[in-house]
């Protein structure tokens, strides 16, 4: 039985929340399949009547050329859309870091300048991915390296009036780890890009992630997920908004209470489940510091949940159409939550 069957209707769930200031957004990573130009992305999102378009990676912008960025800014302004921009890893020791693009500090400085030109109040960035929880470099060292990079650009960010939003990304950090990174780097210019779907890939209850990171949230990636038990351990899967088992309506209600004025930006990813073999001692090499009470809270999410139907991959030629359908369905559910 799905947990969401126990939730009150979306309108009732949000009856006490002031929704007038909520800005709905779309992360273009959700729509990467069509390979649209930023102008096509903005036009499509304008048709969806959202207020924020989040270009989470440089590739979605097409170029950091100043004239190009100014054209994108003007196009967004004409459509009455706020723009946010981002990049990938800023941790030199992460497996996700692209050294071909130059030093991490230089990459981040370029993005701060780009954000100032295009009118983005933040630069979204990540430390790494789940792979960085194991390997020759300890997770704590990756965090220290990321902090070092952030501190190196503090003055540039302050002068530009730009804040750096570090995402809890792809299983790299749990909430308390990201909170420590932000505090160490300087919460005056560093905050969180809160992803509601990624906590499941760090064995963490998304509701705990929200409560921990709420004071630091600058922007968001909103995504739903399911979790259930399998013989090997735990399966987690990202799904359309409203189709998961983590009580997203409750999550969203609490988000609006704790993070008023922050964008409610959807990053819709629908894919195959990922299995976490929690009964294997080797698996725990990347999770030795996870408190037992936090893991117990995560495991409780799987109680009484039936496995989802077998995932059927979408044919490659249908990727673009499927991505749009997933995003639009998730957006309709988000609006139903906010319409009460």
Image (spheres, rainbow, N blue to C red):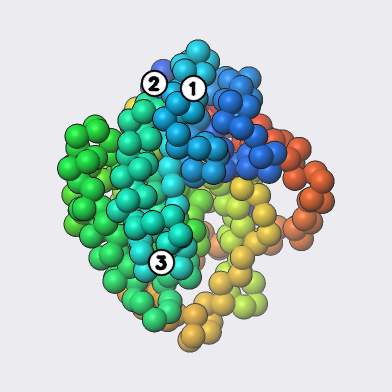
Tell me which residue sits at (51%, 18%) in the image.
Answer: 75
Residue 252 place in picture, x, y as percent: 46, 38
Which numbered tag is attached to residue 45?
none
Label 1 and label 3: CA atoms lie apart by: 33 Å
* Residue ID at (23%, 60%): 148
Q: Which residue carries the number 3 mark?
A: 94
Query: Is 220 situated above or below 22?
Result: below
Q: From the viewer's perspective, is 142 left or right of 220?
A: left
The disc label shown at residue 71, or none: 1
| Mark 2 closeness class: few <14, some 14–19, many ≥20 residues within 10 Å | few
Q: Position of residue 44 (x, y in %)?
A: 63, 25
Mark 1 neighbour density, 10 Å: few (under 14) some (14–19) many (20 or more): some
Task: Give the label on residue 21, or none.
Answer: 2
Extreme residue toward the top, this view: 78
Is residue 176 visible to us here?
no
* SS label for mark 1: helix
Earlier residue among tags 1 and 2: 2
Q: Which residue appears at 52% of the width and 77% of the height?
A: 278
Label 1 vs label 2, nearer the camera: 1
Q: Residues within 10 Å of mark 3 (few under 14, many from 20)?
A: many
């Amino acid at each position: 039985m799905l947990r969401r069957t126990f939730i009150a209707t979306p309108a009732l769930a949000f009856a006490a929340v002031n929704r007038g200031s909520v800005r709905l957004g779309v992360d273009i990573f959700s729509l990467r399949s069509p390979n649209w130009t930023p102008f096509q992305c903005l036009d499509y999102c304008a048709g969806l009547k959202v207020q924020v378009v989040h270009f989470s990676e440089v590739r979605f912008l097409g170029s950091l050329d100043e004239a190009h960025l100014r054209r994108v800014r003007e196009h967004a302004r004409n459509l009455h859309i706020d723009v946010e921009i981002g990049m990938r890893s800023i941790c030199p020791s992460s497996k996700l870091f692209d050294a071909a693009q130059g030093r991490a500090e230089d990459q981040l400085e370029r993005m701060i300048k780009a954000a100032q030109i295009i009118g983005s109040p933040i630069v979204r960035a990540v430390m790494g991915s789940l792979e960085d929880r194991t390997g020759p470099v300890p997770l704590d060292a990756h965090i220290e390296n990321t902090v070092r990079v952030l501190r190196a650009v503090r003055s540039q960010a302050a002068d530009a009036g730009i804040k750096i939003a570090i995402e809890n990304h792809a299983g790299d950090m749990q909430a308390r780890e990201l909170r420590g990174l932000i505090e160490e780097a300087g919460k005056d210019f560093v905050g969180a890009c809160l992803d509601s779907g990624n906590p499941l890939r760090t064995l963490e209850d998304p509701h705990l992630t929200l409560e921990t990171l709420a004071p630091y949230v600058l922007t968001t990636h909103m995504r739903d997920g399911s979790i259930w038990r399998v013989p090997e351990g735990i399966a987690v899967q990202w799904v359309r908004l409203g189709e998961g088992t983590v009580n997203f309506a409750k999550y969203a209600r609490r988000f609006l209470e704790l993070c008023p004025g922050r964008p409610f930006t959807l990053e819709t990813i629908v894919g195959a489940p990922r299995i976490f073999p929690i009964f294997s001692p080797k698996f725990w090499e990347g999770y030795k510091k996870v408190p037992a009470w936090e893991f117990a809270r995560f495991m409780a999410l799987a109680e009484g949940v039936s496995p989802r139907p077998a995932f059927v991959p979408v044919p490659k030629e249908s990727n673009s159409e499927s991505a749009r359908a997933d995003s639009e369905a998730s957006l309709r559910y988000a609006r139903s939550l906010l319409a009460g």
